Structures are given as structure tokens and as C-alpha cells.
């Protein structure tokens, strides 16, 4: 048998403890994780992860958010045991998906301290459209749960919110935590939350959800090739198939109609309080991305002009003429 090129697992972590205290002093875990899809929910992260897996990329089969709860040693054992140890020239990148990582303080600290070279893939969309999409996702996938009115969900996550809240749409604050900008006073005026930022994590590839449904074939191909280049893949990349994750129970007709009737249109008058808060987040996030984040040489986008135009378009209130 070919010798395993990786160091023994017991030299990296204790074989029983789960948290970061069980990581051996001086252990270098960076070889275990080349990339991570870290944000945000409802931005095509499932589409991207399944696409990469279909290409042969070594990515964990399910969402893996151990770093959110500081279980670094448990993640280390999982990565070590679940993904190939190939270190040759044909080695495929090793990765995971956890859309919660970008909003989690513990996750980013773990990336900084243990996976400092891991490349991060971040999907974004307008915070306003994110809130509506996430609300509707919960509406059709948990039809037995009562959903709170949007005015109660516009700010912090509260008991009974099912994770739907304006706080989760604070994309500018979560992106700021990556430490890819100068952090000037003028820049920080666009922030809302007082969150700690890390000093050094890996390079970032950021895309807007609309880029996954672009009908311009030249740009679509460029997106695939740019993503591949970011991950160190070679050759011509095939088209990215769309993955619909909206309705788990759509095949049950009796549930489908009732579940979909619970969906909201954020432009309806009953949502005006939440909409004002979310549109403010949207405008601040758009400005910060365009004027600050994109200036970093550690942040990569495909078709920069097109990406910028989409993000700039967020500031146009979609409900203004409704």
C-alpha cells in the first residue's frame, strides 16, 4: 500500500475531545481544508457545493458547522477521516459548506488560528430579498410552525423566529469581520453592529446570486472559469445546474397549496416596518461592498463591472412602483 502522506491524526488532535482545546499545540491543520463556502443562506451555496462535488472536488457531503460551536477537534477528525489524503499533483481541493460561518465569531477565529490559508467562497444578495427568501423558505418547509409577523422579526432573532430576523441580513457587518478593508472611521459609519474582526483569513471569492442565473453565456462561462481558477482547478468547466431548495413538501399536494399560501411579498403594506429596516441595510451593504470591499487585493469577483452593477442596483427600492 502507498504510505499515507498526512501526519498521524493523533499528532493533530486528541482522539476524544471535540473543542479547540483538544487541538495539539503547534499542530498544523491547514492541509485539511483548502476552501469553505461560508455565507450566506439562500445565496446559491447548495448549488455551488453540489456543482463542485460533481466536478470531483473533495467536499463534505453535508453542511458542516462544527466551527460555529468551537468544535475544532471534531471537525479535524471528520475532515481527516472523510476526505482523501492525496497530496500529489492531481490532488483535488478539500472543502466544506457552512453558511453560518461568516456570522459566527467562533468560526472566523477558528479560521484565523487553525485554517488561515483556507479560501472562502461567499454568496450574497440584497438583504431585503434575502429576508423575504428566507422567510418563505421557512414558510414552505416548516408548515406545522407558526411564523411571527415580520415587524417582530425585523431586528434581533427572538424565541419563535425560526432563525428569521433582520440581524441575519446584516451582511455588511459580517463581511467587515473578514478584515479585508482598512477599517477607517468613514467606512465604519456604514456599520450597525459592533462586531470584532479577524486579522487574517484566506482569500475571498464573492459572487452575487444573480450571477448564477445570468443569461449572458460569455459571462456565465467566465464565472465558471474564475471560480475554478480561484480553487486551483484546470480545464474547461461545465455549466452549473440550478438546485431548487425551496419546497420540501411540494410533492404532497394537500400541503403544497397551504404551505405556499404562507409566503410573503415584502412589498405588501403589512411589511412596511421590516422593509424600511431591511432596505437601509441593503443600501449600506451595497455602498460598503462597492467602495471598500472590492478595493482589497485579497477579494476576487468574476466580471467585476457586472457584479458591481448588480450590487449598485440593490439601492433601487423594488417596492417603489408597486
Image (cartoon, rainbow, N blue to C red):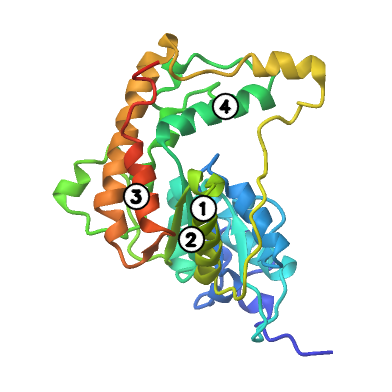
In-front residue for pair 205/178 = 205
What is the quadrant of residue 232 in the picture? bottom right
Circle 4 crowding by C-alpha within 10 Å: few under 14, some 14–19, many from 20: some
Q: Earlier in the sequence, mark 3 or mark 2?
A: 2
Q: CA distance from mark 2 to mark 1?
A: 6 Å
Q: Position of residue 49 (x, y in %)?
A: 63, 55
Q: Position of residue 279 (x, y in %)?
A: 34, 28
The residue labelled by disc 2 is 120
Q: Quadrant of the C terminus?
A: top left
- Determine if residue 230 is in view: yes
In-front residue for pair 209/72 = 209
The residue labelled by disc 1 is 38
The residue labelled by disc 4 is 162
Relative to 259, is 109 on the left or the right? left
Judged by depth in the image, the label closer to the viewer, 1 or 3, is 3
The residue labelled by disc 3 is 308
Q: Position of residue 278 (x, y in %)?
A: 37, 28
Q: CA distance from mark 4 to mark 2?
A: 26 Å
Whether the residues at callouts 1 and 3 have beta carbons within 8 Å, the answer is no
Count of numbered circles on the image: 4
Judged by depth in the image, the label closer to the viewer, 4 or 3, is 3
The circle on residue 317 is none
Q: Earlier in the sequence, mark 2 or mark 1?
A: 1
Residue occupying the point 66% across, 24% down: 140
- Determine if residue 16 is in view: no
Q: CA distance from mark 3 to mark 2?
A: 19 Å
Secondary element at tag 3: helix
Amino acid at each position: 500500500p502507498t504510505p499515507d502522506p498526512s501526519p498521524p491524526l493523533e499528532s493533530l488532535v486528541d482522539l476524544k475531545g471535540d473543542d479547540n482545546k483538544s487541538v495539539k499545540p503547534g499542530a498544523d491543520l491547514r492541509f485539511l481544508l483548502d476552501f469553505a463556502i461560508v455565507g450566506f443562506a439562500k445565496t446559491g451555496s447548495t448549488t455551488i457545493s453540489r456543482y463542485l462535488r460533481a466536478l470531483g472536488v473533495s467536499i463534505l457531503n453535508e453542511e458542516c458547522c462544527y466551527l460555529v460551536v468551537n468544535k475544532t477537534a471534531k471537525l479535524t477528525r471528520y475532515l481527516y477521516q472523510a476526505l482523501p489524503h492525496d497530496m500529489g499533483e492531481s490532488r483535488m481541493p478539500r472543502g466544506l459548506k457552512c453558511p453560518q460561518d461568516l456570522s459566527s465569531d467562533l468560526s472566523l477565529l477558528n479560521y484565523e488560528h487553525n485554517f488561515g490559508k483556507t479560501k472562502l467562497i461567499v454568496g450574497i444578495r440584497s438583504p431585503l430579498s434575502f429576508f423575504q427568501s428566507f422567510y418563505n423558505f421557512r414558510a414552505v418547509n416548516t408548515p406545522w410552525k407558526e411564523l411571527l409577523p415580520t415587524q417582530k422579526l425585523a431586528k434581533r432573532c427572538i424565541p419563535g423566529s425560526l432563525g428569521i430576523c433582520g440581524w441575519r441580513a446584516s451582511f455588511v457587518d459580517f463581511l467587515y469581520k473578514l478584515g479585508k478593508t482598512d477599517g477607517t472611521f468613514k467606512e465604519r459609519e456604514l456599520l450597525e453592529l459592533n462586531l470584532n474582526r479577524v486579522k487574517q483569513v484566506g482569500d475571498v471569492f464573492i459572487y452575487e446570486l444573480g450571477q448564477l442565473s445570468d443569461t449572458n453565456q460569455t459571462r456565465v462561462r467566465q464565472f465558471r472559469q474564475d471560480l475554478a481558477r480561484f480553487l486551483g482547478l484546470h480545464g474547461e468547466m461545465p455549466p452549473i445546474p440550478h438546485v431548487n431548495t425551496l419546497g420540501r413538501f411540494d410533492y404532497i399536494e394537500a400541503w403544497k397549496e397551504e404551505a405556499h399560501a404562507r409566503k410573503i411579498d415584502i412589498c405588501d403594506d403589512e411589511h412596511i416596518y421590516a422593509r424600511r429596516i431591511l432596505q437601509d441595510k441593503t443600501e449600506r451593504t451595497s455602498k460598503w461592498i462597492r467602495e471598500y470591499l472590492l478595493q482589497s487585493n485579497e477579494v476576487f469577483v468574476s466580471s467585476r463591472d457586472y457584479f458591481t452593477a448588480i450590487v449598485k442596483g440593490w439601492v433601487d427600492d423594488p417596492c417603489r412602483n408597486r
